[in-house]
Amino acid sequence: MAKQNAVITGWGFYAPSKVLTNFDLEKIVDTTDQWITERTGIKERRIASDGENTSSMSTRAAKIALERARLRPSEVELIIVGTCSPDYLFPATACLVQDALGAEKAGAFDVEAACTSFVAALAIANGMILGGAVRNAVVIGAETLSRLLDWTDRGTCVVFGDGAGAVVLEASNASVGIESTVLHSDGSKGELLYVAAGATRIPATRETVEKGQHFIRMQGGEVFKLAVKSMADAADEALVDAGLTLEDIVLMVPHQANLRIIEGVAKRLRFPMEKVFVNLQRYGNTSAASIPIALAEAAEQGRLRRGDKVLLVAFGGGFTWGAAVLEWYGVPIPDRREKSIVERASRQLEDLVDRVRPV
Ligand code: UT7
């Protein structure tokens, strides 16, 4: 059998309809639209409504991606949700998505590498497809960070937003698919960006809640310094692994943390900003969701064509960072429908034979 590659055949995203602008934030904390715009590039972000959560947003994004891929939920073999704001500690958010989609055959689990979660989930799904364990996977990045924010902390509440993005990854005879993935971590820097309480080391108590230990705490400046170098290094490494150079890259889709960080990475790599996709002005930093949302928007805007080399690059709490290089495929595998027609016809034939067989 010819070597199979994993290609993206579907993509979709969901952003809650509730918009929180910088001007809205001026009424909540001591900040200004000017400060937020100059320091981050963010103008507004989306906030999940009461009935929305990480699994419901994931499901909406996944449904769009599956429709694009023309893959039925019953055909899905694996669902991975990358998130650091799951519905529950357990069950996994991916299991809730599996149920909501009716993907009765699919394995499902979550991956937690903070803002790097989507790239990590993509690396795992790619490995499982290349290894022959599954033929397809729905890979999701989704967050409801608004529920983990201290809305009196101007250093964090102006930065983050909610949303979900998904891709369908499938085994294909295409000569190129995901070309490389790299993942790194430095756990010694975990306390620069973390949620202290509410899990098992410091379980939730009245005291932890009163101290606000269930909220995201971040040393933004320190995170910033590490981000630029680690993203640029990961991009270089992923390109070397793929046997490519930056000149081959048609579009870079970086984690949408801060416009100054993205510009810093582009400058360090000497990569033109015109080839960098940026949408953080409208969604803020949606952590694990930012790359799949950006990738889906880029595709919807016609910025990706079959054969384009794409570079994804992320960093986040943990510390974690990573990158992936892929060749954009973009439309469903042409022979699938024919295959299913042949399969259906042969089933009908078997039924017919059973019926006419003498008892
Ligand atoms: O997704 C991965 C993880 N997170 C990130 O990527 C975030 C990375 N970091 C950042 O994006 C930036 O560090 C922030 C946007 C969070 C902060 O920007 P900064 O330029 O690093 O500001 P700073 O924390 O160094 O603070 C500078 C000043 C301080 O005032 P003083 O001490 O100089 O008087 C802050 O108190 O700005 C003040 N400040 C604000 N002022 C108005 C901090 N937040 C705000 C605010 N509005 N929202």
Image (cartoon, grey):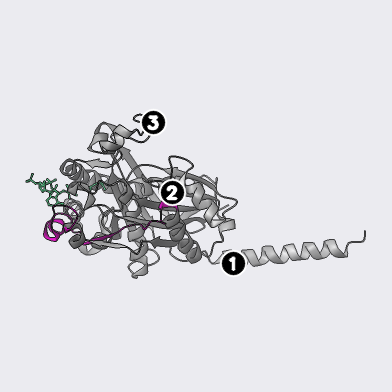
- Does 316 appear above or below 202? below
The residues colored magenta run: 27-55
Q: Nearer the viewer, residue 175 or 255?
A: 255
Left or right: residue 252 versus residue 339 is left
**The C terminus - image quarter:** bottom right
Left or right: residue 62 versus residue 234 is right
**Residue at figure coordinates x 81%, y 66% from the top left:** 352
Residue 171 x %, y % = 51, 54
Distance, label 3 to label 2, CA atoms, is 22 Å
Q: Which residue in the protein does label 1 denote?
A: 337
Element type where label 3 sits in the image:
loop
Element type where label 2 sits in the image:
strand
Label 2 beta carbon within 8 A of ligand 1: no
Q: Nearer the viewer, residue 351 or 215?
A: 215
Distance, label 3 to label 1, CA atoms, is 48 Å
- Amino acid found under the numbered disc labelled 1: Arg
Q: Which residue in the protein does label 2 denote?
A: 81
Please, which residue is most extreme toward the bottom here?
Answer: 302
Q: Which residue in the protein does label 3 denote?
A: 200
Instruction: Confirm whether residue 180 shows in the render.
Output: yes
**Residue at figure coordinates x 33%, y 70% from the top left:** 301
Single out the mark in the foreground, 3 or 1: 3
**Residue 323 belongs to the span the image colors magenta:** no
